[in-house]
Amino acid sequence: MTLKEDIQRLGKQARVAAHRLATLTTDQKNQCLQAMAEGLLKASDIIQKANEQDLGVGRTAGLSAAMLDRLALNDKRISAMAAGLREVAALPDPVGRVLEDRTRPNGLRLQKVAVPIGVIAFIYESRPNVTADAAGLCLKAGNAVILRGGKEAIQSNRAIANVLLDSGAGAGLPANAVQLVQTTDREAVRELVQLTGLVDVVIPRGGEALIRAVTENARVPVIKHYKGVCHVYVDRDADLDMAERIVLNAKCQRPAVCNAMETLLVDEAVAKTFLPRIANALLAKKVELRGDDATRELIAAAKAATEADWSTEYGDLIINIRVVADVDAAIAHINHYGSQHSDAIVTRDRAAADRFLREVDSAAVYHNASTRFTDGGEFGMGAEVGISTDKIGVRGPMGLEELTAYKWIVEGTGQVRE
């Protein structure tokens, strides 16, 4: 069987599974999710042994510390995967929701009802926990899913997928509802995203290169975000203690993720006070500082930021710093260099906050909080399949409701159109 034929086989099997999934009740789906969660916990040692193989290959290949952190699994992370499945089971079923209900003057009753999308191709890198997150969310929303993880996590993904399939099947999971592409051949991605008539939507989750490659080759719709160039702006009326906590959290808590801050903007009115202070705190956490001229006058350790730096997603302990004139300049910088992902203002000035929240064109905008909260779990959606920066359709964290489509149900009493 050729690679093309194998990928087509997965698509055909997923299409059949999607029809079966659409008939499951909420209780049946939840039973599958609970069984899958229990299976992950029982197989924790098996999963970690597979993960150690991936980590060993990654270290030999010279993966960065941040990338290895994304890849690593331990008891805590596997427990979190199981908890995520259980949280999804506890959430309301998104399928069957009546989104709109109207009766026309001629007596026709129209209901706009949420339904499964059908078949989702999910392409991702590094983080093997995403295998469970995507499978669980797609299952609860009634969708079959074809998973294609990165080669750096192939053993981990295989182990997790096998556990999910085996434990789910025992609870009534339809065959092929969750499928993992077994090959690491990049050509498999191109074939997968061209399965028109079999795959309904592609969701890529990873670095900018992956997402652009998927988008350029796809013949089916793609929900995407190219990168997470996130900002924190410290206003002249900020509580500087609060600002320090938010900046350190946004940059350092987990620098490899897409909602981590890449650029710090500081109002010139507080720059002399705040910049030396935050620089010391960031340097203590081994963060490399890059700044504009005004920043470098106040922070000797800062390197000169290039024009390209302002639009770069580092995914590492590197930060850009720019001194700006006011909230207007901060908004202008973000809307020019940002990626429409997540951006925050720290201020006690309600008017400045309102302007920032209204005028920054991003999927998530924050007042006095870290950008690290842009996450399905933190937003109360359970696990997520990614963060969309698209403006048509889904935007922001993609949880259960975002994995449904809708159809119109029309009830009549014999009406015909004149």
Image (cartoon, grey):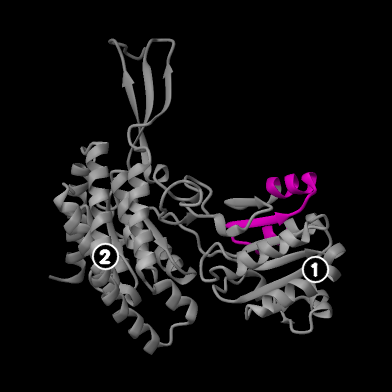
| Number of callouts | 2
Q: Earlier in the sequence, mark 1 or mark 2?
A: 2
Q: Is residue 38 magenta?
A: no
Mark 2 closeness class: few <14, some 14–19, many ≥20 residues within 10 Å: many
In the structure shown, which secondary structural element does the residue marked by tag 1 occupy? helix
Q: What residue type is labelled 2?
A: Ile
* Distance between the alpha carbons at the discs numbered 1 and 2: 46 Å
Q: What residue type is labelled 1?
A: Phe
Q: Residue 117 carries which label?
A: none
Q: Residue furthest bottom?
A: 60
- Left or right: where does residue 149 sit relative to residue 231? left
Give how far across and how far down residue 283 sits, in percent.
68, 79
The residue that disc 2 covers is 160
Q: Where, by quadrant of the figure, is residue 81 drawn?
A: bottom left
Mark 1 closeness class: few <14, some 14–19, many ≥20 residues within 10 Å: some
On the rendered image, what quadrant is the C terminus found in? Answer: top left
Give how far across and how far down residue 302 sits, in percent.
74, 81
Q: Residue furthest left?
A: 1
The residue that disc 1 covers is 274
User: Magenta segment range?
Assistant: 332-358
Task: Identify the residue at horizontal 47%, vertical 45% (top origin).
Answer: 393
Q: Where, by quadrant of the figure, is residue 102 drawn?
A: top left
